């Protein structure tokens, strides 16, 4: 009987700790059908840094069906995607030193993965952000909302 009473508080403590610790990362998969498996990234405001883990579960090469994740203010996303086209694959379809870009990952092909960690301080509370794939023609289908909560 005594053991039972000792276990309960320990278990409760473990549960509350895991509930309070924010997960400062997201796993997103992209595929050969030009789709992300998520349409929203929610960043907990307690996170100082946030990591994007991108996988490509398709088979097509990065120069044919490449995918990345670029985060910008929603109002900037169309122009950043357009400028990314001119930058080309060697620049991950992101204009070099583009101040409008909060963060971006490399372009990957089928079977590949990449990660990128960035400072959450770059995101202003109340501002609308978008994540999208800057590979030519993909932004129409491959995008979603980013919010800090
Ligand atoms: Cu893409």
Image (spheres, grey):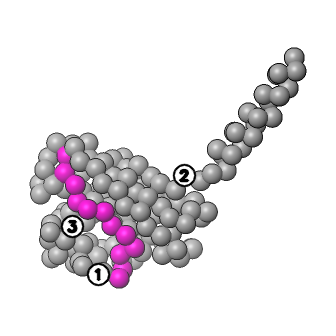
Could you tell me residue 50's position as x and y percent?
A: 48, 61
Foreground pick, 26 / 132 = 26
- Number of the label disc, if any, that sits on residue 27: none
The residue depicted at 82 percent of the width and 22 percent of the height is 4
Which of disc 2 and disc 1 is earlier in sequence?
2
Q: Is residue 95 left or right of residue 49?
A: left
What stretch of residues is rendered in magenta? 99-110
Under circle 3, the secondary element is: loop
- Viewport quadrant of the N terminus: top right
Q: CA distance from mark 1 to mark 3?
A: 12 Å
For residue 126, what is the image quadrant?
Answer: bottom right
Q: Is residue 112 left or right of residue 118?
A: left
Quadrant where the C terminus sits is bottom right
Task: Using the rendered image of the protein, determine whether residue 20 is visible from the camera's viewpoint.
Answer: yes
Q: Earlier in the sequence, mark 1 or mark 3?
A: 3
Q: Which residue is mark 2?
A: 23
Main SS of residues in magenta: loop
Give the distance between the C-alpha atoms of the residues marked 1 and 2, in whole angstroms: 29 Å
What numbered label is drawn on residue 97? 1
Q: Which mark is residue 92?
A: 3
């Amino acid at each position: 009987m005594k053991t039972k009473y000792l276990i309960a508080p320990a278990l409760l403590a473990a549960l509350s700790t895991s509930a309070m610790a924010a997960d400062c990362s997201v796993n997103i998969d992209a595929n050969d059908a030009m789709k992300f498996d998520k349409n929203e990234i929610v960043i907990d405001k307690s996170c100082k840094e946030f990591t994007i883990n991108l996988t490509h579960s398709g088979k097509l090469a990065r120069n044919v069906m490449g995918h990345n994740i670029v985060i910008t203010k929603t109002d900037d996303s169309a122009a950043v995607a357009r400028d990314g086209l001119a930058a080309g694959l060697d620049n991950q379809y992101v204009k070099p030193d583009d101040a409008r870009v909060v963060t971006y990952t490399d372009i990957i092909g089928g079977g590949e993965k990449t990660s990128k960690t960035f400072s959450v301080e770059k995101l202003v509370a109340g501002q609308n952000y978008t994540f999208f794939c800057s590979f030519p023609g993909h932004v129409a289908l491959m995008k979603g909302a980013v919010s800090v909560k």
